[in-house]
Amino acid sequence: MPRLQLIATAPMGLEAIVARELKDLGYTDMEVENGRVTFAGDLQDICRCNLWLRTSDRILVKMGEFPAKTFDELFEGTKALPWEDWIPSDGEFPVEGRSHHSQLSSVPACQGIVKKAIVEKLKQSYHTDWFQENGARYVIEVNLHKDMALLTLDTTGPALHKRGYRKLVTEAPIKETMAAAMLQLSRWNASRPLYDPCCGSGTFLIEAALMGWNIAPGLRRSFPSEHWRIIPEKLWTEAREEAFDSVRDDEPLQLTGSDIDPQAIEVAKAAAKSAGFGREITFNVIPAAKAKPEGEYGCLITNPPYGERLSEKNEVEKLIRQLGHTAAQLPTWSFFAISPTKQFEHYFGRKADKRRKLYNGRIECQYYQFLGPLPPRKH
């Protein structure tokens, strides 16, 4: 089986979390860069990583990287790569592009050159002048950065945060990948209660349930690379069987969410049921001020409203003060919140033990972590 250079793309600020996930899956030969983690793997690892990675956006095959200051260099560099190993004669191969700080700044022109070069290469292999492109889909990206061209094949399709359990979405959700990252950065594990007082469509709680039962987040969805000729069907079957065998659904979960919006709670219940956790997660329609988390040594994790308008800002300030008041009543609990509010700690009533800059979508936020005591060890 050929050794490949694979790329797990990462939301800004989460590269180290993606790298840690890869390490936990057994990958050691990796390089962490802005927005991506490059690692060595094979065809089986395309299947495994698409199924298992909770915090990455997508898995790419690195086809090649070379200097490209001119269209000629871009054309020849692209044509030299082994496209025929991957793309069959009926394959559909759209080209997407990006360019930053490069002399070749016209993205449509670069996409056109790359497409033309791949067509020329495939003509040599398949001895035809015409490609119908009515077969499996192979999305190619040319990424130009500081006059270096990186060419990749996308194995994932719709980004990995689209787990397959959500049919409806409420306003201003947090991506599943970001929710999983925040959970991994917290001290939560399945033996501890988890509460979200602004749960919206239930993302934190459903992601926690997937983690708590060790369910591969990609198990419910499909990927374009399942239809690629180069990847034998049995590799996908084996990867899914491995994932099914890893499930620990006998672990009791203590997961509760509440929200002031009844419609959001209905969406959350539907998503939890779709994900297989209709009985494991409790949802209530109550304002955050009346939230009463139960149990000891729990974790409260939330994405409170941001308050775009002035009238909303006062409400957000009040809500953060209420979260601080709740925290004061729960001395054994830990509290985690993502917010762009600069004076979050002031309103909450104490300094965070840890802060980390994260981006919720394009909004720069801080991930505030107020750490309570760890549960006593069981003898």
Image: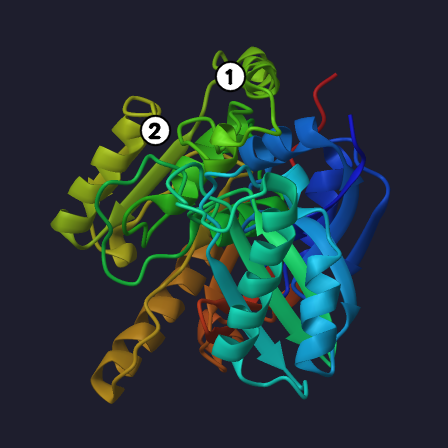
Q: Secondary structure at mark 1?
A: loop
Q: Which mark is residue 143?
A: none
- The percent position of residue 94, horizontal first and vertical second, equals 46, 56
Vertical position of residue 368 compared to residue 167: above or below:
below
| Left or right of 19, for residue 87 | left
Q: Which residue is mark 2?
A: 275
User: How would you rate the neighbour count of disc 2 (Cα within 10 Å): few for under 14, some for 14-19, many for 20 or more?
Assistant: some
For the question of whether residue 309 can be seen, the reply is yes
Vertical position of residue 48 compared to residue 156: above or below:
above
Q: Which residue is mark 1?
A: 251
- The percent position of residue 332, horizontal first and vertical second, equals 56, 44
For the question of whether residue 372 can be seen, the reply is no
Quadrant for the C terminus in the image: top right
> For the residue marked with disc 2, what is the amino acid?
Ala
Label 1 – label 2 distance at C-alpha: 16 Å
- The percent position of residue 258, horizontal first and vertical second, equals 27, 46
- Which residue sits at x=34%, y=28%? 275
- The percent position of residue 265, horizontal first and vertical second, equals 20, 44
Q: Secondary structure at mark 2?
A: loop
- Which of 43/187 is in front? 43
| Left or right of 248, for residue 174 | left
- Which residue sits at x=48%, y=33%? 218
| Left or right of 14, for residue 270 | left
Q: Earlier in the sequence, mark 1 or mark 2?
A: 1
| Left or right of 346, for residue 302 | left
- Which of 275/152 is in front? 152
- Which of 179/224 is in front? 224
Foreground label between 1 and 2: 2
> For the residue marked with disc 1, what is the amino acid?
Glu
